[in-house]
Amino acid sequence: MLLLAPLLAACTDPPADGLTGTAASLDDTGRGESPIDKGWIIAVPAAAVDDLWSTTGNKPIGQQDLPHIDARLSRDQVTQAGGVVAALDDDGEFVLPAREGPHFLCHLERGESGQEWARGCAFLTLPASGELRITDGEGGFSAQVKK
């Protein structure tokens, strides 16, 4: 029986390490929502955002404009600032390995030029565990903890 334990463990899915989440594009014309299945969700500790932004070459932006932001930002810049990156799968699902506390969250995409861009951001205090809901639509980018 002890010899089979490693085989059984290898056949089970590993536990998720971080906050699970879904990302969806909202449509206000009645077509419902569809998964955001391209790019990444990033989280940077809120205390590091000013330093991060100074490395991007982007102009400062007010918090009221964050949901509709369209600014250069790369995964490398995110990780160098102490942030984390989670890939979006075909169903818009992701696992974000961020620590508890206030964070700056964005949806990153690779543009036609190959450069990565933030396509909407928000500040959110992340819990130690739980599920995130990311949406983007007419109202812009939104990040919430599902209850």
Image: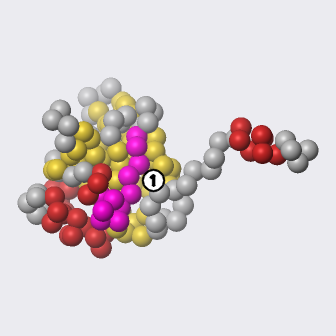
Kind of residue sitting beneath label 1: Leu
Query: Is 119 included in the stretch rendered in magenta?
Result: no
Numbered disc 1: secondary structure: strand
In the displayed image of the protein, which residue is found farthest to the top? 31
Residue 68 in sight from this viewpoint: no
Q: Quadrant of residue 119?
A: top left
**17 or 127, which lies in front?**
17
Residue 39 lies, in percent from the top left, at: 32, 40
Residue 147 lies, in percent from the top left, at: 51, 56
In the displayed image of the protein, which residue is found farthest to the left? 59
43 relative to 100, above or below? above
Residue drawn at (29%, 33%), measured in percent from left and top?
Answer: 27
**43 or 6, which lies in front?**
6
77 relative to 93, above or below? below
Residue drawn at (28%, 70%), measured in percent from left and top?
Answer: 48
Residue 14 in sight from this viewpoint: yes
- The magenta segment: 78-88
Indicate left or right for 59 with 15 as reference. Answer: left
Query: Is 81 included in the stretch rendered in magenta?
Result: yes
In the displayed image of the protein, which residue is found farthest to the bottom? 47
The residue beneath circle 1 is 96
113 relative to 45, above or below? above
Image quarter where the N terminus lies is top right
Residue drawn at (43%, 31%), measured in percent from left and top?
Answer: 90
Indicate left or right for 125 with 74 as reference. Answer: right
**139 or 52, which lies in front?**
52
Residue drawn at (46%, 66%), measured in percent from left and top?
Answer: 99
